[in-house]
Image: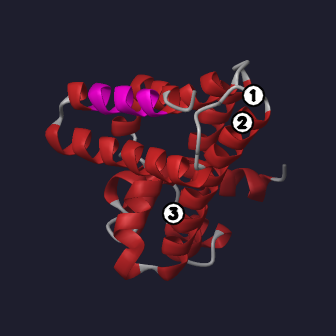
Amino acid sequence: MSKAEKTRQFIIEKTAPVFNKKGYVGTSLNDMIEVTGLTKGSIYGNFENKDEVMIAAFEYNLKMLRQRFNADIDNKATYKEKLYSYPERYRAYFDKLIISGGCPIQNTAVEADDTHPVLKDMAMEAILSWKNSIVSLIEKGIEAGEFKAPGINPERVALTMVATIEGAVLITRLTGRLDHLGSIMDSVKKMIDDLG
């Protein structure tokens, strides 16, 4: 990795949590300067503009989130255990998620809805990718004979899981009540159990 690539990566890693906490519109150049310790010239010598930094920051936040889940999923033997990774990981990871500003997909989707079409599309793609990965796990579980409930609709189950988990994050952040998160994640596990 060249010096310029290292500097660019450093900027992304340092600014990503700030963008996730303060928002893409709310994060200023001064915030980026403060967190990186670099000058405006150093930042914009590596990025064309703030949009380029925030897009890279969202991609980085998403990559970190996916790595955490993928590591758990890859280490599970059954498709049921793989699906359990979602509610279990959210429950275990919630404190870190809040410290880092919350779910980057949810934060970006809400903020970018009216302000930044590119980020909105990226958040939409992230949600759809997550849903599709759950669909794939359910379909593979059906093929393997692990999920046997009659009339399983993988698309509907996956969409409901994503919406329920994202709703749990929102409710728990607003209320500060971890017991709400626990109850909702138990409901997600029940949904998985009901697959058979």
Residue that badge 1 annotates: 145
In primary-sequence order, the first of circles 2 and 3 is: 3
Q: Range of the magenta residues?
A: 181-191
Q: Residue furthest right?
A: 1
Quarter where residue 45 is shown: bottom right
Residue that badge 2 annotates: 142
- The reply to whether callout 1 and callout 2 are in contact (CB within 8 Å) is yes
Say few, some or many: other residues with alpha carbon within 10 Å of mark 3 (under 14 / 14 to 19 / 20 or more): some
Residue that badge 3 annotates: 39
Say few, some or many: other residues with alpha carbon within 10 Å of mark 1 (under 14 / 14 to 19 / 20 or more): few
- Kindly tell me whether residue 19 is visible in this rendering: no
In primary-sequence order, the first of circles 3 and 1 is: 3
Separation (CA) of disc 1 from disc 2: 5 Å
Instruction: Please state which of residues 8 and 45 is positioned toward the viewer in this rendering.
Output: 8
The residue lying at 54 percent from left, 48 percent from top is: 158
Q: Secondary structure at mark 1?
A: loop
Q: Secondary structure at mark 3?
A: loop
Residue 151: image x %, image y %?
Answer: 58, 45
Q: Secondary structure at mark 2?
A: helix
